[in-house]
Every structure is written in structure tokens, then in C-alpha cells.
Amino acid sequence: MGGAGGLLAGQRRALILAALRRNGGVRVGELTAEFGVSEMTVRRDLDALERRGSLRKVHGGAVPAGPSTEAEPVFREKAALGAGEKRRIGRAASLLLPRAGSVAFGGGTTVRAVARAVGPAPGLTVVTNSLPVAELFHGLDEGDRPAEVVLTGGVRTPSDALVGPVADAALAAFHVDVLVLGAHGLGVASGLTTPNLAEAATNARLLAAARRVVLVADATKWRTAQLRTFAGLGAVDVLVTDAAPPPAAGDALRAAGVEVRVAPPG
């Protein structure tokens, strides 16, 4: 987390939760040094995260709120991390989508960046389990909105995705041309992963409904595998990312027949 000075509160808190998942705990002194802020500021961040149920404070730091380590940043905090990279990925991925037909959008801030870049889409039918994606398309001018926006229903996650049996049952009835999907973690052996068990099942339903899969993920997702795998790399047709994958990952993607597109700068 080096070089994190000058971050907004939401960005710091997202990084704290990422460190918590990665290391199983965080220390106030280490966070103070990493972020270049006062101990009081770090303690306020931990207080806010504890009130939300994302962690449990202990003497000198914090640990996960429960044994599952499923704490994840809320949508607005995740959106603040790597915003420029997500915009680049969103623009590049949007060019792969049809202007008419059906597109499914999964949850997550990078997927929403794709939806934002789509622009007017009156010939498109959108299926999504993402509240922010549905709200984005609904907020367009009437002539620019997709022909239909179908929101699955389900249990809301901290990432504002709808998951669980209700979402799964809804998605079982759909067949879409393209799916735009994100992942909390990527790995050569672990594939596409998430810390949320219900989200893993719902993502698998999304994948089953799609004829073509566009995975959108920034390069940091290769650093760690999350709790549950919901697909192997071979389930993906195209990966749109902000930087070339690590060498071993690049080899695995080529072997799986995945096309890799690195979003251009700017």
C-alpha cells in the first residue's frame, strides 16, 4: 500500500479492508505510516468500518468481523480506487458490445464503468444484478435508454450487487448475447474468485446465460485469490484490463484461448 498519501477517506477504508483480507489483520501504527496520516485519522477510519460491520477493532488495530473474511468495501469506496484505470477499461470494453441485442452486466465498479461508456443504446436489452448499473441506464434520457432493463432482484451485497436464490432463479431463464463481468481476484490456478459465496453462485448463473463473456479487471486483481472460485479462466472469451497480465497468467490465458485487450492510455 506504499505511496498512499493524500487519499480520501473512502479510498483509505477500501485499502484497509483489502489489507485486512490479505493479511488477516491490520495495525494502527502501520496504517499511519503507509497513509501518511495521524493515528487519530486511522482510528476514525477503523471506527467507521466497525460500525458498518466490516471489521472488529482490537488493541492496536483490527481483525475481520467474523471467520469468513468476507468483508468487502462498499460500492462508493471501491469506485474511488483506480478510477482512471476503470474508465479506460470501461471505454475499451464498451467497444466490444453490440448496439442491439442483449447484454448482461454483473456487479462491481469496473462493470459499471463499462455501462457508463456504452452511451445511447435504444436497441439494447440489459439484464443485470447490479443496482448501480440499473440506475445508470434508467437515468438516461428516454430516447437513449435501452429498450428494456431487467433487474434480477435478490439479496444486496456491500458491492450493491443482488445475489442469492432469487437472483439465481431469475437468471436461469435468460440467454444473452454478451456478459460483462468482473471478479474480486484472478489466478492461474484459482481462476475467477470472490469473497462472497452467494455472489459466486450468482456469477456462475450469469456465465451460464451468456454466449460470449467479456471479463473486465485491472491488473491488481492478479495479486490475490479470494475465498471462492466461480469460474476458470477458460470461461472467458475476452479479458479487458489496464496492463499486461503477469507472464504466467499471460501463458495461462493464451492456453485457455482467452483474448487479452489492454485498454489504451488516456
Image: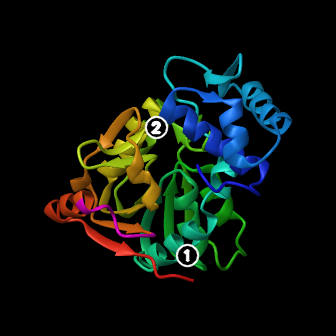
Q: Amino acid at mark 1?
A: Val
Total numbered badges shown on the rendered structure: 2
Q: Disc 2 marks which residue?
A: 199
| Callout 1 secondary element | helix
Front residue (pair 252, 142) = 252
Label 2: which secondary element: helix
- Tell me residue 110's x, y (percent): 54, 60
Relative vertical location of residue 137 with respect to residue 172 in this rendering, above or below: below
Q: Which residues are magenta?
A: 242-247
In the image, taking residue 41 as reference, residue 125 lies left or right, namely left
Residues 224 and 237: in front is 224
Between marks 1 and 2, how big is the CA–CA gap? 25 Å
Say which of 191 and 238 sits in front. Answer: 191
Image coords of residue 158 (percent x, y): 62, 38
Viewed as shown, does residue 47 lie left or right of 25?
Answer: right
| Relative to 43, residue 144 above or below | below
The residue under the point 33% across, 51% down is 207
Q: Please tell me the numbered disc located at residue 118.
A: 1
Name the residue at 77% across, 57% down: 6
Q: Say which amino acid is labelled 2.
A: Glu
Residue 102 in sight in this render: yes
Q: Is residue 245 magenta?
A: yes
